[in-house]
Image: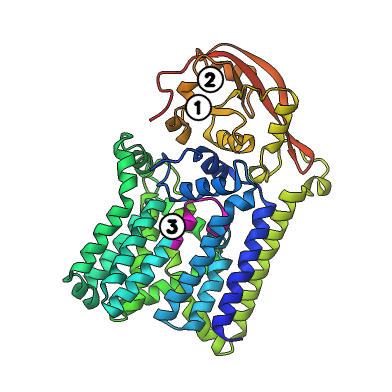
Amino acid sequence: MAPLPAALWLILATLLLRLALGWALGLGIDESYMVAAGREWRLGYFDHPPLAWWLTWGAEQVFGAGASPVLLRLPFILLFAVSTWLLIRLTTRIFDARAAFWAAVLFNLAPVFGVASGGWVLPDGPLDCALLAAALALLRALEEGRARWWLASGAAAGLALDAKYSAVLTLLGAAFFLATTAEGREALRRWPVYAALALALLVFSPVLLWNATHAWASFAFQGGRALGGFWHPLAPLLVLGGEALFLLPWIWLPLMVCAVGAARRGPREWRGWLLLSLAAPPVIVFAVVALWARQKVLFHWAAPGYLFLLPLLGRAVAARVRAGGRLVRVWLALSAALVLIGLTLVGSEVRLNWLPRVFPDFERGADPDLQAVDWTSLREDLAQRGLLGPPAPVIAVLRWQDAGKLDYALAGAARVICLGPDPRQYGVNGATTAAAGADVLIVAPGMDLTQIETRLDGRFAAITALDPLALRHAGRVAAMIPLFRGGFYRPGPNAGGK
């Protein structure tokens, strides 16, 4: 089979696999939160720029509130198919079609891309797609010198910023490339580069406008993650190790070898230097920030950097496959087998809950995959007990994570508010203030009446315990969720967030 048809078969096959996985898994914590808190369309949001939120909002407009996880994930699954195609086109232009095919295979095998970015409701999938589009357009602009490709690169760069603020690191890598190569310096003498920059800022302007009218809340939240706490001298090694796990260590290490090779060749091989320039800033910056950041650097943040090393590794794999190397074929086959087996085990457990049959003494509430189980059984329990109205009740939680899970499951049957110190988007939406004076149901996983009264001191005239709710997983009770009633809610001084 020729490389190009094989690549198309790869896109189709992995698309179908992601649809199956999207059907098997409920929405995770971050996914539920983005879907539920993003039901109010806005120019910007507290946690991230709006592109992924707009996609979830659009999916619910088409499929309805509380649509099944696979339908809500559909835009992200389709975007990953587009991302795979863009990676193939980029690698083909830089190297050849065989290198492009193997780069695409590795893109799908690395869990941080093929699983997380590939089908979950997160900003990372739209970010990867926009960055790949920007890089491909930049390459064509450098090769052909046409203004339209510069403008296309600028528009895609703006969309990348609309997906995640960390896109700025990759864009800084592009600026570094332009400054350090003859091709780039020549381009900097012409107006299309600056028109592309202006277009990127124009596409990003809704985020700037929203932040300007919300005390720069989103910038402050994300920027605060990099502020100093204690000195952590070993943190960069921990971050790099975590990134290796997310990519699979036996993929991460060859990527690093390819990066070193590109660095040695330097700007004289400008296409490889372009890939390295785009790749290096996220990998380096997040490892360095981990030295002092008071919040743990999450391992997937640097993934866009590794994205642009995949063409280099694809070329190396293609060369070894062409030379008849058996070891590289075994390496690829075992990687694919491991990923498929892992996804099958996880997907079947979340869908069928077979783990308690294997371990009969499994404690209730200790289910390791509850994060991927939707809370729809709580809605059924509340409805059977007549607690969902009419009129629609107000239901409070103390953590934004619980707010997202519950709000998605209720699908608009109740107003969900978050009374904890970190409400995220629920603080911006304003429902907390709007619920003043109401009697409120309080859903508080893992908490008792004394803890609730302490945490919510002065917010209610009285709080009483009700029978707990049963969270069911594939028909079995997996956890009991405490439920309380709070009389006459009084908003605190910071209600509504900012």
Decide which of 450, 172 is in the foreground and name it: 172
What span is in magenta?
Answer: 116-129
Where residue 189 appears, as percent x and y from the top left, is: 16, 71
Q: Nearer the viewer, mark 3 or mark 1?
A: 3
Q: Which residue is mark 1?
A: 420
Give above or below for 247 relative to 473: below
Check contact, mark 1 vs mark 2: CB within 8 A. Answer: yes
**Residue position for label 3:** 127
Horizontal and vertical percent position of residue 133: 40, 66
Residue at 53% across / 77% down in the picture? 102
Residue located 64% across and 78% down the image: 330
Amino acid type, mark 1: Gly
Q: Earlier in the sequence, mark 3 or mark 2?
A: 3
Binning the other alpha carbons within 10 Å of mark 1 as few (below 14), some (14 to 19) or many (20 upward) gives some
Q: Is residue 252 visible from the viewing direction of this image? A: no
Disc assigned to residue 270: none
Give the vertical position of 342 relative to 313 (above or below).
above
Label 3 or label 2, whichever lies nearer to me, is 3
Magenta segment: does it hold 245?
no
Say which mark, if any, is on residue 455.
2
Q: Position of residue 288 (x, y in %)?
A: 36, 53
